Amino acid sequence: MTNPTTSMATPVTTTSARLHDALPVEQWEATGFPGRWVGGIAMVLGPPLMLAGALLRARFHFFYPDQLAAYERHPALVATAYGLFAAGSVLLWPAVAVVAARVGARSAGWGLWGGVLVMFGLFARAFHAGVDHLAFQLVRSQGVGPATEAVSAGYGAFHVFATLNLAILAGWVVLALGAWRTRVLGPVRAVALGLTSALPLGVLKGTTPVSLVALAGLCAALVPLGLALLCEAPRPRRTAVLRWVPLTLVTLGLMVLLGQAG
């Protein structure tokens, strides 16, 4: 008599093997989650996106009343600037995860605390980006005056993410020290990574010269490391790339459409 368990398990195994052959995923090994491809691409894209967003809003004064007024006069430009900055900040999480894993493989403490602090800081920045978006929608619906009054009334209000402000500042320093001590980064690029701690935080913050220095340091630290990760052997087959790229683009497109649908 045929074993029903065996006969049912065979198609599953075969389907899984075929799917793996069609869309192969490299073993994580020393890079850890989410792997060198996601982490490397995030390192290459995230910091330049943040820098581009900061440059687009650089001509407007730093504090929130001027940022709201700038949105009223140039809504597309300011929305694009904030969108690029937020997208780059979100892309930093896989980049930081891979850097922390590489540091942690040689020094668990530095990798753990550097990665945890920076990640919590990125959550806080995502929260700030959501508040920025709401404030800009108030400008559209109510006008810049009422929107400014609303932001002023709630600007100092307590929220859970305020407790993560120190993580935003300290996390990059801890991660940079860990990367230098473990030789994941050389001294110059480790200092450049640590400069990210100078990036201003909070709601509706514009661009200052310090912002540009901090983001230039982030680019100098992570972009070369990301390119090095992507160039490491083994490289994916061309057929795998031709399958993964359109699948990724279609997935992103569906996510955008579903997100707009509510």
Image: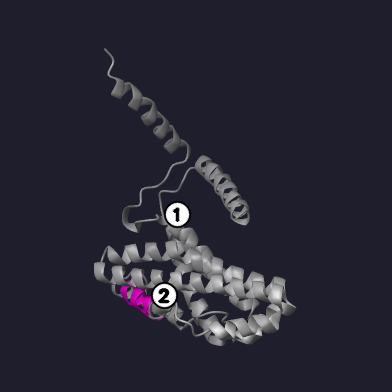
Residue 190 included in the magenta stretch of the image: no
Mark 1 surroundings within 10 Å by alpha-carbon count, few (fewer than 14), some (14 through 19), many (20 or more): many
Q: How many marks?
A: 2
The residue lying toward the viewer, choosing from 52 and 62, is: 62
Horizontal arrangement in the rendering, residue 52 relative to residue 165 (left or right)? right
- Residue tagged by mark 1? 37
List x then y, in percent, for residue 42.
48, 61
Q: Residue at x 54, y 79 (%)?
A: 203
Q: Say which amino acid is labelled 2.
A: Val
- Quarter of the figure with residue 60: bottom right
Q: Which residue is drawn at 45% across and 81% down?
A: 158
Q: Main secondary structure of the magenta part?
A: helix
Q: Say which amino acid is labelled 1.
A: Trp
- Residue tagged by mark 2? 160
Magenta span of residues? 169-179
Residue 173 included in the magenta stretch of the image: yes
The label number, if any, that marks residue 169 in the structure image: none
**Residue contact between numbered discs 1 and 2, judged by CB atoms under 8 Å:** no
